[in-house]
Image (spheres, rainbow, N blue to C red):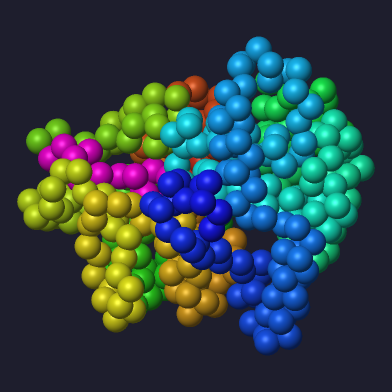
Amino acid sequence: MPPSVRHLHKNKTWEKFRVFEDINRYKSDEYAQALLTAINFALKEGFDPFEYEQQFQKQIQQEIAPASVKDKVWTITQGLSYFLQKWEKRNNEDSTLRRYKHPIELLTQWLTLRKMQHQPLDILTDEHIEAFLEEGKEQHEWSSRTYNNHKGFLQTIFKFLVDKGIMKSNPCIGIALKKTKSQKHKYYDQRKFETIRELLKKHDPVLFLAARLVYYLCIRSDKELKYFKIGNIFLDRKQVLITADESKTDSDRYIPIADEILPELEYLVKNYPLDYYVIGPGSRNKFIRENTPGRIPFGRNFLSARFAKIRQLAGFSSDYTLYGFKHTRIVHLKRDGGKDPDIMQLTGHTTYEAYSAYLRDLGMEGDPDAINQISRKF
């Protein structure tokens, strides 16, 4: 590791870089060897994984005044490094920062192979970025959604640099998005609901609790459940709090606790500190399946990866997800005569128009039982 950046890495001499690039998808020695060859070639051609940090440190040492930022001719590497350093100071989550680092690393490797990494930022055009994305899609077998995500991340990066006056125009503007198939998070009919519930209970108690929380509290299985803390459970009021920072909504919302989930929540409040996350990060011991709340939240894909195994046992398609239990709960409440204002408190919808659109998406725009009672018979 270059001495100029060691203080940023706890003064370590060496830093390990993990490079996967879909290796888990192929799982072959041939692919691993091809990946190793590509990495070695990039390194020999001058690619330096520490270059972002070195460029930024050099910039600090030169004490560039804010007014001179627009006057400087920025190289591509310098501009990308500047973005990462500024983005890191915004106190973004590590996962958010990684989402930007990954496309920057891939783009830098692509540019290095073409000896463009030290060229001025303004030479980049939409043709360069589109070529990078198309080659990435072919080489790494990106889905259309992954292609669009990489395009979106790069567009945000270049917009930041344009806004700062570091480059003149955004080279991502004008690049068309790929058409994607929207995942609907299907509702579980009664047979599928019973099947998946029994499999969860038998094979994965952690996931069983997570599914029950998604179902009864109608919260999202990714962010809302991930950052749900013991301290957000209010037993005296029979409510849980989901804050705006953890939700898709713009305001905090209190969700009533169903009697069926109350014993689990009472146990958690009684036995764990208030600052612990309800679903812990899990254990490296694959035989430990009981949930243990922890000081840090579970990691990315922690629940979805576990659910994929249960779904495979059930023989369901990928349209059946953990989030689908929220949809199933809404369908059950509507069919059992639940009032729309009460259901909206669960879904987090603040307008009836948005709530109605949500019901239409679930196929619940009408009450079939009520229609059958008043309709004439053939």
Q: In this view, does 32 lie to the left or right of 239?
A: right
x and y, in percent, of residue 78 in the image: 70, 37
Q: Is residue 156 left or right of residue 325?
A: right
Considering depth in this image, is 375 or 139 the residue closer to the camera?
139
Considering depth in this image, is 179 or 275 the residue closer to the camera?
275
Considering depth in this image, is 359 or 124 the residue closer to the camera?
124
Q: Looking at the image, which residue sits at the far top?
A: 67
> Residue, x 59% and y 61% (percent of image)?
319
Q: Looking at the image, which residue sits at the far right?
A: 127
229 in relation to 28, above or below: above
247 in relation to 268, above or below: above
Considering depth in this image, is 35 or 258 the residue closer to the camera?
35
For the record, the magenta segment spans 220-235
> Residue, x 52% and y 77% (percent of image)?
312
x and y, in percent, of residue 91 in the image: 44, 34
Q: Mark yes or no: residue 133 visible.
A: no
Residue 206's image quarter? bottom left
